[in-house]
Amino acid sequence: MELLSELLGDSPVMTALRETVRRLLQPGRTRLPPILIQGETGTGKGLLARGLQAGSARADRPFVEINCAALPATLLEAEMFGFERGAFTDARQAKRGLFQTAHTGTIFLDEIGLLPADLQAKFLKVVEDRRVRRLGATRDEAVDVWIIAASNENLQAAVREGKFRQDLYHRLSVVSLEMPPLRERGDDVVMLAERFLALASADYGRPPARLDEAARARLLAYQWPGNVRELGNIIERVALLSEAPIITANLLDLEPGPAPSAAPLAALSAVDVVRNHLMSALEHTGWNISAPPASCASPAIPCWRGWRSAVSTPIPACPSVVTSSDGSPLARRAGRCPPPQKRRGSGATRHSSLLDSREAAVRRIRTRWS
């Protein structure tokens, strides 16, 4: 468990994570299931993967890491599975793939959510059969590897959206571990900052330093969108550019940000955008729908004369005064508008801005849209 000890923190989430790992890595257990590590960017997923390797029975075996986002799909396939001589242009000699290189050890696939769809199917076969076939080969070769995958995406959401194979997700997530974001780890932030400060001071040959109370408070108030990686970079910068024995809040150069909202606002649909624009325009004209405002001249936003399908939710009652095109009042009773009128001499139905509620008014507006 040498590298697992690098997972510093006394917060409940980190304590629970270390306990889960200890139960997983029982002494003498050589057969281990695939593990999926999920968490935001910079939380330490790679550190956890190396800690798992170091604490397992495969500690002295190969540890091979692949970043699925760093290579194009064609090169990634050749790197993962290998190729035979003549499999493609410039393949002058056969080459073992990274799965074969990791034989008897561990293979760590970072950013597994970005694995191309065609490679997901081939990778699934390797996970299920424990055999690989090189590009240009006619036979499979057995491999004994412990597979650890990591992703900063929500793979369950990717499965629902059709971006990631469901069968592959279930194969990889036999054991799923979550690396918590730094903002949820409480006082672990200060513990990690002090550790990074000691390491950076030793690396750059500067005298030891410590954080004052204001700096600690600033670290706790910051939201850390870049998580542990961002914290390490900030402390390293401070250690490099300042020789002060006491690190103050001003040296950290952090601005406390607002706490993240519990649930993000849902994106507005096109119908919502049109509805909101229409309601704003009607309010602007005092619900005079006989003469649209100048904003309707924009071709990007339909006017209510040609608008047909945007309003589907209830709308508040009609205002106390409804006006005609010349601005004269037509009705003054709150919540009630005059009935439709006829155009004299034409027999056509007058444009019905005079309805008994805003909902009815807008419903009448929806004409000539096809």
Image: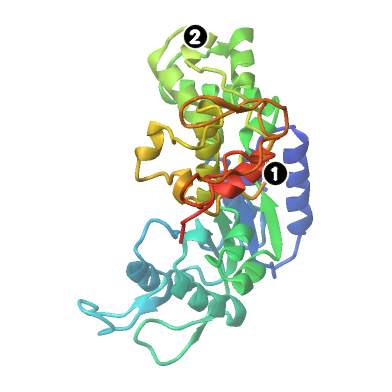
| Earlier residue among tags 1 and 2 | 2
Q: Position of residue 235 (x, y in %)?
A: 49, 23
Q: Position of residue 16 (x, y in %)?
A: 78, 44
- Is residue 2 among what the camera can see? no
Q: Which residue, given by chain and number where applicable, does mark 1 sit on?
A: 314
Look at label 1 and name its amino acid. Answer: Pro
Q: Vertically, is 249 above or below 347?
A: above
Q: Which residue, given by chain and number where applicable, does mark 2 sit on?
A: 250
Q: Vertically, is 162 above or below 129?
A: above
- Is residue 70 among what the camera can see? yes
Which residue reaches farthest front? 345
Please give left or right for residue 198 compared with residue 187 in the image.
Answer: left
Look at label 2 and name its amino acid. Answer: Asn
Q: Tags 1 and 2 in contact by the CB under 8 Å rule?
A: no
Identity of the residue drawn at 65% across and 61% down: 35
Residues 85 and 260: in front is 260
Please give left or right for residue 266 compared with residue 334 in the image.
Answer: left
Please give left or right for residue 262 compared with residue 369 in the image.
Answer: right
Task: Kindly indicate the quadrant of the structure image that contains residue 191.
Answer: top right
Residues 306 and 77: in front is 306
